[in-house]
Image (cartoon, rainbow, N blue to C red):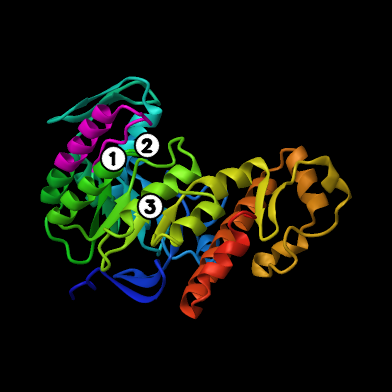
Amino acid sequence: MALKKFSFNVIKTDNFSRCGVIKTHRGIINTPAFMPVGTQATVKATFINDIVKTGSEIILSNTYHLMLRPGVDRVKFAGGLHSFMNCSLPILTDSGGFQVMSLSKLNRIDREKGAIFNSHIDGKKIILSPEESIKIQKNLNSDILMVMDECPKRSKDYKIIQKSMELSLYWALRSKKEFGVIPHKALFGIVQGGLFDDLRIRSLNELIKINFDGYAIGGLAVGETQVEMFKILDVLKDHMPNDKPRYLMGVGTPSDILGAVKRGIDMFDCVLPTRSGRTGLAFTWNGRVNIKNSKYQKDNQPLDPKCNNFNLNKYSKNYLNHLFNTNEILASMLLTLHNINFYQELMKSIREHIKKGTFDDFHDKYIGKL
């Protein structure tokens, strides 16, 4: 029996914000959507079934890390990433380009060979070409694959960013050829160009010519200000295809998400809710809470009295403060789950307000608070 074809439909707009549905053979994804990050085939400090219960409808995993450990052959032997990690949700895998830039102390870029780098684990020399990145993602059996791109460090040098953007376009074309035609899977192109408006628009237009199933915006969340990020999104929002998902990679804070949705973005991922959960920072509707602060030793109220999911409201700030100050594993588990649950509550509220035509009011109420 043929698997269901990947598709996307916008069901409601409110100015530039959009509410839509991505259909995959593993299930639907309501957009705007936030993808918890399962870098190494696990969303740290949580059970995958609990991730599903938060309302998460897709997760992200990482090509770079999985090809190093445990290795793609081992995941393939297990039947693919879904079987390996016991995950029924759709999975998006990134291409590894960002990790090559951020994690490898020794790396160089070759136009034809790809990224040549030393593993941050054991120093082993590795060559990751656009074709190899796609082959790895196919063997992982992810549902949404990303093209191989170069994610340069932030730079004001126009020529450096231009050269990098042009290389990413060349690799995008090679990635598309290697991907071929797989109706039940999707391949997303990645817009590069730094903080230069003309390079961003050129990158997008060239990717549209290649024709991808969705378009991601990469090269942000690398040190620019929120104002600079929103400026790029403002530039691109009039040029992005209306009938394809729009994915802002590696972003971000709740306020980042609100501002990006206002500018037409449909998909997000970020390690922030999980990483913050492991270090004692909670996201709530009343703002951020550093639960390690000594003032919470005399606070018997829950982080969020309205949260009934997982009975998280039965744990007081006093107790959570104690868990963190005694380095108990349960501390990371509870706060990570709380943060992911909050992010999904945020996304659900965003979708509801777009459908009602009240998103701008919702945005204005919380943009500076979260």
Verify whether residue 73 appears in magenta. no
Q: Up-down: is 145 above or below 314?
A: above
Number of callouts in the render?
3
**Gap between marks 2 and 1 measured at Cα:** 31 Å
* Residue 138 % position (x, y): 22, 51
Tell me the mark number nearer the camera, choosing from 3 and 2: 3
Residue lying at the far right in this picture: please name it: 298
For the residue pair 43 and 239, the one nearer the viewer reads as 239
- Of the 4 image quadrants, the one containing the N terminus is bottom left
Label 2: state its secondary structure.
Answer: loop
What residue did someone put label 2 on?
A: 69
Mark 3 = which residue?
233
**Residue 80, image x, y percentages:** 30, 54
In the displayed structure image, the side of residue 129 where residue 151 appears, left or right: right
- Identity, as a three-letter code, of the amino acid under mark 1: Gly
At numbered mark 1, what does the secondary structure look like: helix, strand or loop? loop
* Residue visible at 39% across and 42% down in the picture: 220
Residue that mark 1 sits on: 193
Q: Is residue 274 visible?
A: yes
Between the C-alphas of marks 3 and 2, the distance is 35 Å
Identified by mark 3, the residue type is: Leu
Badge 2 amino acid: Arg
